[in-house]
Amino acid sequence: MSAPSLLLVDDDVPLRERLARALRDRGYEVRCAGTVDEALALARAESPELAVIDLRMPGRSGLELLKELRAQDPGTQVLVLTGYGSIGTAVEATKLGAVGYLQKPVDADELLAAFKGETAPTSIETPSLDRVEWEHIQRVLADCDGSISEAARRLGLHRRSLQRKLGKYAPK
């Protein structure tokens, strides 16, 4: 009997490589991708039995990938990962056919337990408004390749106001 195939899609290279190594050590045949397009190319070549996909990636989102994977092979079990959990996206992922929705950070044992249905549904805490603002600023800053001036322009803030916000610690 061959090892179960698993497609791991995340733009966070260290996380992706760590999870891939851990899953291979547990006997899974793991293929990795950093974008939706790379993942679709791998899935077309050989449809995976399992897929773990990040919700937020550059370009197209993990929800788009979820739709396409499920359309290609309804038998593929998909688990969605995110660093920015919300009840709305969890519900949408489930409606699209995801077997589970986990917030990062996660380890290989948590992933495998979620595929087996051995975990309780993840409760997603409602973040504070300060936390949501902080995460949004961080995402915009990352999208601007760290340019504070460009991020301030996109956010509609004065550059110094953005610098002050960035100088504070992330809210809990």
Image: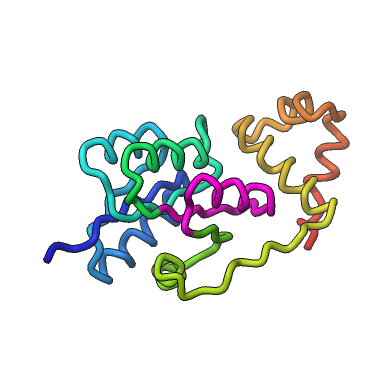
Q: What is the tally of numbered marks visible in this picture?
A: 0
Color scheme of the displayed model: rainbow
x and y percentages locating residue 27 in the rendered image: 23, 68
State left or right for residue 149 relative to residue 53.
right
- Residue sitting nearer the eye, 162 or 136: 136
x and y percentages locating residue 88 in the rendered image: 68, 48
Asked if residue 67 is among those painted magenta in the image, a careful observer would answer no
- Residue sitting nearer the eye, 109 or 167: 109
Which residue lies at the image location 31% right of the left edge and 65% below the top edge?
A: 23
x and y percentages locating residue 101 in the rendered image: 54, 58
Which residue lies at the image location 40% right of the left edge and 47% below the top edge?
A: 9
Residue interval drawn in magenta: 78-99
Placement of the C terminus among the 4 image quadrants: bottom right
- Residue sitting nearer the eye, 19 or 61: 61
Residue 152 in the image: above or below residue 66:
above
Q: Toward which corner of the image does residue 40 lie, by quadrant?
A: top left
- Residue sitting nearer the eye, 167 or 96: 96
Placement of the N terminus among the 4 image quadrants: bottom left
Which residue lies at the image location 75% right of the left edge and 26% below the top edge?
A: 154
